[in-house]
């Protein structure tokens, strides 16, 4: 089975190399790993001996879960060296200059020689993997060197390979984690059934992160002028599938006292133009704002990256995109401002979405009729207040994960 796993990783590595000739992201994937070991060796030569904490994230979403732990660790032990790795270019490219990490790099392909070489050079005091990262050879390299390793913000589902009859080697490596911090009791119950008891139900560190973001949200004078006393529907990270519902509603049924902010996931010019061509009411692009007409405009189109998490402070209601494609984007950011959230049908991977639907703090829709019903229901003030109270309670009940993890690490693994 180990041979099959290593063969699969090797085939994947060669497939990415081949794809690099045709696809820019695959090319980034390969280029970023060029001279990885030499660069890491050079870095280690100038690092003082002491605590080295390695955190690995698959991509940007997992980084947002790991970030509160890095911030807490750096505050507690500012002299510690933080090494951050990514599997995906989308994570690495956006966070390669993250100021609290002393070194940011890619994770090498999970082949035995590469994993052993990486761990041997890095020699971490502690390794922290985030959510779904189960690279078998890296875990073995850490285990053989008796380096403690924890998993944070983890979610387990019955469909995962650990719980299948053919998942023996994955289960064996999963048991080598010194501790697993899981998001919910269902995950804990699944682990108990397969004989893993070194876990804590700690919730999702992203909740701590979005609460922190909400407290330090930026103000935008342009948005304040645009709002002008209106109710605001904030549409975040939208795709065409989402806009197929939103734009007909905005064009034909948006109440007079409402305005809309649309922040599409893809801000390339062709996507912005697609949205503009479909709008039949007054709009403005953020990059080309005309202040003289801003108050009269009904739609503000955000054509940049970086504003969205702060824009929810202006909202009355949020629509989160992605649910008509692969999966929804971040629902916790609007919830941190206590906004009810509407999204499409692809949400099952996210515990908070499932929980908030069950509590009537969030609403999944499959067509414009269902969106219309959800929107109209939330016009009722009593119903709206019940929904926002539910969200407030959820945030309160599920915050504090980062502190719980930090206390464990300080007590068990980072003693001086």
Image (cartoon, rainbow, N blue to C red):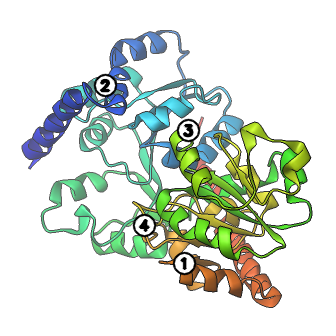
Q: Is residue 251 left or right of residue 343?
A: right
Q: Report the front residue among 95 and 172.
A: 95
User: Callout 2: helix, strand or loop?
Assistant: helix
Q: Which residue is mark 4?
A: 349
Mark 4 and mark 1 lie on one chain; the one further toward the N terminus is 4
Q: Quadrant of the C terminus?
A: top right
Query: Which of the 4 image quarters holds residue 37?
Result: top left
Residue 258 spot, x, y in % from top left: 80, 70
Residue 410 spot, x, y in % from top left: 60, 45
Residue 117 spot, x, y in % from top left: 28, 23
Q: Which residue is mark 1?
A: 368
Q: Which residue is mark 2?
A: 30
Specify few, some or many for label 2: CA neighbours under 10 Å numbering under 14, 14-19, or 20 or more: some
Whether the residues at callouts 3 and 2 have beta carbons within 8 Å, the answer is: no
Any part of residue 400 in sight = no
Using the numbered discs, state the Cα–Cα distance from disc 4 to disc 1 in whole angstroms.
23 Å
Any part of residue 174 in sight = yes
Using the numbered discs, state the Cα–Cα distance from disc 3 to disc 2 in whole angstroms.
28 Å
Query: Which of the 4 image quarters holds residue 316?
Result: bottom right
Using the numbered discs, state the Cα–Cα distance from disc 3 to disc 1 in whole angstroms.
26 Å
């Amino acid at each position: 089975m180990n041979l099959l796993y290593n063969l699969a990783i090797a085939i994947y590595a060669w497939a990415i190399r081949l794809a690099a000739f045709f696809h820019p992201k695959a090319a980034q994937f390969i280029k970023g790993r060029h001279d990885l070991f030499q660069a890491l060796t050079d870095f280690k030569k100038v690092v003082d001996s002491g605590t080295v904490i390695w955190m690995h994230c698959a991509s940007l979403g997992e980084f947002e879960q790991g970030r509160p732990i890095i911030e807490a660790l750096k505050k507690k032990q500012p002299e510690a060296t933080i090494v951050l790795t990514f599997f995906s270019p989308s994570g690495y490219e956006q966070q390669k200059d993250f100021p609290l990490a002393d070194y940011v790099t890619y994770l090498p392909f999970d082949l035995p020689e590469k994993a052993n070489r990486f761990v041997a050079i890095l020699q971490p005091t502690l390794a922290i993997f985030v959510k779904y990262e189960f690279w078998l050879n890296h875990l073995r390299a850490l285990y053989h060197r008796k380096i403690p390793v924890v998993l944070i913000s983890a979610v387990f589902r019955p469909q995962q390979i650990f719980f299948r009859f053919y998942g023996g080697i994955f289960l064996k490596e999963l048991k080598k984690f010194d501790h697993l911090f899981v998001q919910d009791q269902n995950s804990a119950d699944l682990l108990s059934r397969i004989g893993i008891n070194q876990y804590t139900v700690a919730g999702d560190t992203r909740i701590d992160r979005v609460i922190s973001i909400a407290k330090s949200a930026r103000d935008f004078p342009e948005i304040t002028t645009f709002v002008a006393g209106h109710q605001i529907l904030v549409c975040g990270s939208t795709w065409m599938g989402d806009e197929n519902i939103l734009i007909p509603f905005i064009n034909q049924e948006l109440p007079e006292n409402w305005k809309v902010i649309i922040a599409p996931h893809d801000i390339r010019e062709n996507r912005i133009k697609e949205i503009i061509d479909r709008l039949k009411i007054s709009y403005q692009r953020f990059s080309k704002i005309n202040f003289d007409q801003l108050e009269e405009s009904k739609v503000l189109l955000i054509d940049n990256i970086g504003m969205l998490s702060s824009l929810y402070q202006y909202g009355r209601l949020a629509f989160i995109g992605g649910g008509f494609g692969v999966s929804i984007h971040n629902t916790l950011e609007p919830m941190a401002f206590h906004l009810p959230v509407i999204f499409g049908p692809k949400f099952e991977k996210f515990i908070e979405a499932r929980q908030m639907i069950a509590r009537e703090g969030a609403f999944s829709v499959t067509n414009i009729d269902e969106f219309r019903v959800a929107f109209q229901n939330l016009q009722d003030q009593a119903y709206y207040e019940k929904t926002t109270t539910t969200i407030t309670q959820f945030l309160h009940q599920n915050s504090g994960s980062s502190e719980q993890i930090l206390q464990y690490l300080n007590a068990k693994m980072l003693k001086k």
